[in-house]
C-alpha cells in the first residue's frame, strides 16, 4: 500500500536502496516534528496516530530522509495491506525490507512436508535473530497498522519487542491505537506518542501549503482556515487546491468547512464507506451531538451503538475528551451530519430528540436543551429550562454559561402556543436581554394569562422564573424600577434555598430587588446589607455584568450613608470589571460613577468630581433612573456650594425637584442642600422654609438630623446661635440614624457654636468627635468649608491638628513632622510594655471608634454589628489592656502605639 499522500497527489517511487519510499516533493518541512521523532526512536516504541491525511507517513519519511542511516539507526519500511494480513505475509514483507537495508535474514525454506505454521515460526525466529544480532540499531517503520484486535502486524511487533533486545525499535503508524501492549510500554517509559494534535498544521505550515498553490492570503485568512479545519493537513491541501483558482480566496477560507464537497467526498471514501454497515450507521447517528460516550451511542444507534468502544479505538478521528467522552474531528463531524441529512433526513430530528432525552436523564442541561432546539422541540427545551430555574443564563446573567444564546431563536409560533407558560417565559427572557421592551412585554403578558388559569401552588418554577424576568427587565431602569418590583423579589426569594444555591444569579437578583426597595424607603443600612449579600451571590455566579451592577448599587448606597472610603473602594472594583455588551451596563456604570463622585466631593477632590459629572453628562442625557438622576443633580449642587456658587446650586436643585417619582429621604437631602445654598446667599427665611419642608410642618421633636441641621444653619446666619445650639443638642441626642457626612456636619457646627459661646472644652470635644467620625472615611469637605473659624482654633490646638492632619490637609495648615506611630500595630512602646494578648483587627477597629468618642450605638451602626457584639469586644479590649474604663483603654492604646 502506498504511503499517505495529499489528495490529488502521489508519492514518488522507491528510493535507491528500495527499502524506503521517497519523501514527496510537496512535503512541508517541519523540523520540530522531525527532531521529536529522532528523539522518539531512541526508545523501543514510537506510536504515530491520526486520521487519514493527517501526515503520519510524511512525518516518518521526513525523519528517515534526514536522520536515518549512518551514523544513526538503519530504517526499514513495511506498508500494511492485504498481503500482510497474515503472520507469514507480514514476515515476508519485513524480511524483504530488512534485506534491502543490508540486514541478512537466513532462509527458512523447508520441504513440502512441513506444516505452514512451523514455517511461519521459523521465519519469525530468523528475523528475531537477525535483529538481535544486528550491529546497528534498526528502526522498523510499519505504516497503516490495522487498529483492530488480531492484527498480524501487531502480533509480530509484540513478539519482536519482547525478544530482540534494545537494538530493535518499532515506529507504528496507525489510524487508531494499534493492538500492542501500549499501557505496559507507557508505564515503563518506553513509549513515545505523536497524536493528531501534534500532526496538525500551524499557521506557518498552512501558509507554506497555500504558497505551493500560488495563494498568499493575509494572516487572518490563515487563522480562519486553521480554526475551521483544526489544522488537518488533508483539508488544508484540499482548501489550497480550491483557493488556487477561486476569485475570493480570503472569503473561501472564512467559509471552508466540512460541508465542502471535496472534503465530504474524501471523507466518504477514506472513512465512512470504508466501515462495515453497522459501524457506518454508528458514525452517522452519533454525529448529531458535539460529544458522545458509549452509553449515549447505544441510545442513538442501537444495536450498532454497542460497537462504539471499538470504533473510537480504531479511528483517530474520534478525539478523547476524558471521562469516557469523545468528539469527532470538527470537519468529520460536519461532513457526517451532511451525509446523514442527505441520506436519512427524517431521522435527524428523532436522533436529536433521543439525545436530548438522554442528556436530560444524565443531568446535562445545556446539552439537553441544545439538542431539543436542534430537534425543533421548543416546548421541551423551554420546559427543561424553567423547571430547573435555569432562566439566568437566558437573561445573560451568567455570560460564560453554555446555555447563553441557545434559545435565542425561539419563534413566536412556539412562544404563544401550547398549554404551558414556559416558552413565553423563555421568549420574554431573550427579549429582556436584548432590551426589546415590546416583545418582552407581550411574552410576559401571555405567560401571566396562562398562569392565571393555574392554582397558585401549581407551576411554581414558572412563577419564580417569571419573577426573575420581571426583576431583570425592571432592574435596567435602576433603583426606581427594582423598587417597584418588590413583590417579584419576595416571590423569587420563596424558592427553596437549595434551588437558589444552584442558581446564585437568581438569589442575587432577588436580593438586589429587596435592596432597591429599602433604598427607595430610605432604609439605607438594610439596603447595604441586601446589596452586600447580592454581591456575594453574583460573584459566586461568575457574571461580570451582575457583579458590576451589585457593586455599583452597593457603592452608591454606601456613599449615601456617608461612607466615602467604602464607596470609593466598591466603585473602583466595579470600574475595573470589563464592560459587558449584553445586557447593557449603563445602570451599573452610572451608579458606580455617582458613588465615586459623592466620595470625591466629601473628600474634597472637586476637580475629580467635576470630571466625573462631565463624563456622565457626555455619556447620555442623564441616567434614566429617577433616583440616580436626582442624585446626579444633587451632587452638582454640592460641588457648586463647595466652590462658592450657591445660585448655580439652587438651579441644580430645581432640576432635581422636577424629577419624579422621588423617594422621601431624597427630598430631605435636597432640602438640606437648598437650605445651605440659601444661607450662603443670605436668604434666611428661604433657608428655614427649605428646612421645614424636609420633614413636613408637623415633624416637631421628631424632626430628622438633616432638617435640624438645616434650621441650625439658618439660625446661625440670622445670629440666633443659642437657638441653633439648642436645636443641635436635641437632635444629636437621638440615635445615630443619619448618614455619616451629615453627622460630621452637625458635630462640626456644634463645635463652632461652642467655641463662639466661649466654651472651648465643649467645642474641642465636639470638634474631636467630628474629626473622629470623618477620619475613617476621609471626609474633608466640612472642615475645608469651615476654614475661617477652624484656622485660629487649630492654631492654638497643635495636638488636635497633629492627630488629624490627613483630614485637615486642605486647610493649608503646617504640621510639624516627626515620627508618628503607625496605627493598628501591636508593637511594644519604648518601655517595652505590650498588651498581654494581641488585639484582633475587629477589636482594633472598635478601639479606634472609642478613641473618636463614638457611643456604643454609633459603633454598632458603623460596623454593621449589634450593640451586644460591641460590648463583648469592649470587655475583651479592657481585659487584654488590663484596664477597666474606656478612657483608660484609649490612654493605654496610645502608650502602646496602637492608635
Image (cartoon, rainbow, N blue to C red):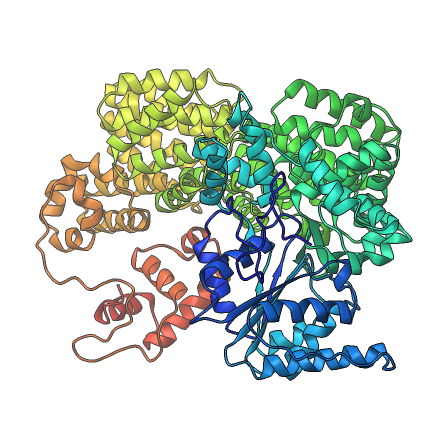
Residue 595 x, y percent position in the rendering: 40, 36
Question: Which is nearer the eye, 245 or 613?
Answer: 245
Q: In this view, does 543 lie above or below 413?
A: below
Residue 620, image quadrant: top left
Question: Which is nearer the eye, 81 or 176?
Answer: 81
Question: Which is nearer the eye, 13 or 590?
Answer: 13
Q: Is residue 110 above or below residue 294?
A: below
Looking at the image, can residue 494 be seen? Answer: no
Q: Residue furthest front?
A: 111
**271 left or right, relative to 706:** right
Write the residue at 70% across / 43% down: 332
Q: In which quarter of the image is the N terminus?
A: bottom right
Residue 485 x, y percent position in the rendering: 65, 31
Residue 228 x, y percent position in the rendering: 59, 38
Q: In which quarter of the image is the C terminus?
A: bottom left
**869 left or right, relative to 121:** left
Residue 120, image quadrant: bottom right
Write the residue at 24% across / 30% down: 607
Looking at the image, can residue 469 be seen? Answer: yes
Question: Which is nearer the eye, 795 or 733?
Answer: 795
Residue 707, image quadrant: top left
How many numbered discs?
A: 0
Q: In this view, does 445 lie above or below 457?
A: above
Residue 59 x, y percent position in the rendering: 54, 56
**666 left or right, relative to 399:** left
Amino acid at each position: 500500500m502506498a504511503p499517505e499522500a495529499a489528495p490529488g497527489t502521489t508519492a514518488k517511487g522507491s528510493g535507491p536502496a528500495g527499502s524506503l519510499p521517497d519523501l514527496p516533493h510537496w512535503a512541508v518541512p517541519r523540523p520540530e516534528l522531525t527532531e521529536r521523532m529522532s528523539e522518539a526512536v531512541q526508545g523501543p516504541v514510537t506510536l504515530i496516530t491520526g486520521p487519514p491525511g493527517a501526515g503520519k507517513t510524511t512525518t516518518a519519511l521526513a525523519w528517515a530522509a534526514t536522520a536515518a542511516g549512518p551514523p544513526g539507526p538503519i530504517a526499514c519500511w513495511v506498508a500494511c495491506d492485504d498481503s500482510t494480513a497474515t503472520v507469514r505475509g507480514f514476515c515476508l514483507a519485513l524480511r524483504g525490507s530488512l534485506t534491502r537495508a543490508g540486514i541478512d535474514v537466513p532462509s527458512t525454506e523447508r520441504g513440502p512436508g512441513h506444516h505452514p505454521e512451523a514455517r511461519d515460526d521459523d521465519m519469525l525466529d530468523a528475523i528475531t535473530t537477525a535483529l538481535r544480532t544486528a550491529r546497528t540499531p534498526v528502526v522498523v517503520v510499519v505504516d497503516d497498522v490495522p487498529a483492530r484486535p488480531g492484527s498480524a502486524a501487531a502480533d509480530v511487533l509484540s513478539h519482536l519487542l519482547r525478544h530482540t533486545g534494545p537494538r530493535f525499535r518499532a515506529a507504528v503508524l496507525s489510524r487508531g491505537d494499534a493492538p500492542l501492549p501500549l499501557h505496559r510500554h507507557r508505564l515503563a517509559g518506553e513509549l513515545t506518542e505523536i497524536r493528531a494534535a501534534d500532526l496538525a498544521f500551524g499557521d506557518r505550515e498552512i501558509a507554506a501549503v497555500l504558497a505551493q498553490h500560488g495563494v498568499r492570503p493575509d494572516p487572518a485568512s490563515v487563522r480562519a482556515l486553521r480554526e475551521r479545519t483544526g489544522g488537518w493537513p488533508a483539508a488544508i491541501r484540499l482548501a489550497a487546491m480550491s483557493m488556487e483558482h477561486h476569485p475570493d480566496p480570503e472569503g473561501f477560507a472564512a467559509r471552508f468547512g466540512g460541508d465542502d464537497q471535496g472534503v465530504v467526498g474524501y471523507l466518504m471514501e477514506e472513512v465512512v464507506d470504508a466501515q462495515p454497515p453497522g459501524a457506518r450507521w454508528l458514525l452517522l447517528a452519533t454525529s448529531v451531538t458535539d460529544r458522545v460516550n458509549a452509553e449515549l451511542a447505544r441510545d442513538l444507534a442501537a444495536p450498532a451503538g454497542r460497537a462504539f468502544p471499538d470504533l473510537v479505538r480504531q479511528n483517530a478521528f474520534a478525539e478523547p475528551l476524558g471521562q469516557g467522552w469523545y468528539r469527532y474531528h470538527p470537519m468529520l463531524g460536519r461532513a457526517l451530519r451532511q451525509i446523514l441529512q442527505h441520506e436519512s433526513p427524517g431521522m435527524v430530528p428523532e436522533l436529536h430528540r433521543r439525545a436530548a432525552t438522554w442528556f436530560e436523564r444524565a443531568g446535562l442541561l445545556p446539552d439537553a436543551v441544545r439538542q431539543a432546539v436542534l430537534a425543533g422541540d421548543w416546548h421541551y427545551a423551554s420546559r427543561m429550562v424553567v423547571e430547573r430555574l435555569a432562566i439566568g443564563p437566558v437573561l445573560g446573567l451568567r455570560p460564560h454559561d453554555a446555555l447563553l444564546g441557545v434559545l435565542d431563536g425561539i419563534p413566536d409560533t412556539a412562544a404563544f402556543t401550547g398549554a404551558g407558560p414556559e416558552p413565553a417565559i423563555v421568549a420574554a427572557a431573550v427579549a429582556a436581554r436584548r432590551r426589546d421592551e415590546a416583545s418582552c412585554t407581550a411574552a410576559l403578558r401571555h405567560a401571566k394569562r396562562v398562569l392565571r388559569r393555574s392554582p397558585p401552588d401549581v407551576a411554581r418554577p414558572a412563577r419564580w422564573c417569571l419573577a426573575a424576568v420581571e426583576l431583570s427587565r425592571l432592574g435596567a431602569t435602576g433603583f426606581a424600577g427594582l423598587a417597584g418590583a418588590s413583590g417579584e423579589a419576595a416571590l423569587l426569594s420563596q424558592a427553596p434555598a437549595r434551588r437558589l444555591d444552584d442558581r446564585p444569579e437568581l438569589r442575587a437578583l432577588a436580593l438586589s430587588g429587596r435592596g432597591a426597595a429599602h433604598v427607595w424607603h430610605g432604609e439605607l443600612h438594610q439596603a447595604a446589607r441586601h446589596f452586600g449579600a447580592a454581591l456575594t451571590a453574583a460573584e459566586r455566579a461568575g457574571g461580570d455584568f451582575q457583579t458590576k451592577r451589585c457593586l455599583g448599587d452597593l457603592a452608591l448606597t454606601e456613599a449615601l450613608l456617608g461612607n466615602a472610603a467604602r464607596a470609593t473602594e466598591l466603585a473602583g472594583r466595579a470600574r475595573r470589571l470589563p464592560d459587558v455588551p449584553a445586557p447593557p451596563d449603563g445602570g451599573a456604570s452610572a451608579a458606580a460613577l455617582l458613588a465615586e463622585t459623592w466620595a470625591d466631593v466629601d473628600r474634597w477632590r472637586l476637580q475629580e468630581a467635576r470630571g466625573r459629572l462631565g463624563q456622565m453628562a457626555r455619556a447620555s442625557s442623564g441616567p434614566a433612573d429617577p433616583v440616580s438622576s436626582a442624585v446626579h443633580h444633587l451632587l452638582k449642587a454640592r460641588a457648586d456650594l463647595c466652590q462658592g456658587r450657591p445660585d448655580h446650586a439652587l438651579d441644580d436643585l430645581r432640576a432635581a425637584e422636577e424629577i419624579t417619582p422621588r423617594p422621601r429621604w431624597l427630598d430631605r437631602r435636597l432640602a438640606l442642600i437648598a437650605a445651605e445654598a440659601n444661607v450662603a446667599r443670605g436668604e434666611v427665611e428661604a433657608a428655614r422654609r427649605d428646612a421645614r419642608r424636609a420633614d413636613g410642618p408637623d415633624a416637631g421633636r421628631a424632626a430628622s438630623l438633616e432638617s435640624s441641621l438645616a434650621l441650625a444653619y439658618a439660625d446661625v446666619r440670622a445670629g440666633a446661635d443659642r437657638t441653633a445650639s439648642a436645636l443641635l443638642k436635641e437632635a444629636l441626642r437621638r440615635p445615630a440614624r443619619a448618614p455619616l457626612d451629615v453627622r460630621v456636619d452637625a458635630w462640626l457646627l456644634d463645635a463652632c457654636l461652642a467655641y463662639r459661646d466661649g466654651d472651648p472644652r465643649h467645642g474641642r470635644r465636639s470638634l474631636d468627635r467630628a474629626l473622629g467620625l470623618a477620619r475613617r472615611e476621609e471626609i474633608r469637605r466640612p472642615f475645608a468649608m469651615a476654614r475661617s473659624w477652624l484656622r485660629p482654633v487649630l492654631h492654638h490646638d497643635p495636638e488636635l491638628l497633629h492627630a488629624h492632619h490627613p483630614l485637615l490637609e486642605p486647610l493649608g495648615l503646617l504640621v510639624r513632622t516627626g515620627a508618628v506611630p503607625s496605627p493598628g500595630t501591636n508593637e511594644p512602646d519604648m518601655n517595652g510594655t505590650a498588651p498581654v494578648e494581641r488585639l484582633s483587627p475587629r477589636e482594633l477597629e472598635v478601639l479606634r471608634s472609642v478613641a473618636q468618642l463614638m457611643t456604643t450605638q454609633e459603633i454598632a451602626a458603623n460596623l454593621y454589628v449589634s450593640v451586644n457584639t460591641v460590648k463583648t469586644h469592649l470587655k475583651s479590649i479592657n481585659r487584654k489592656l488590663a484596664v477597666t474604663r474606656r478612657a483608660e483603654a484609649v490612654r493605654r492604646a496610645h502608650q502602646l502605639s496602637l492608635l
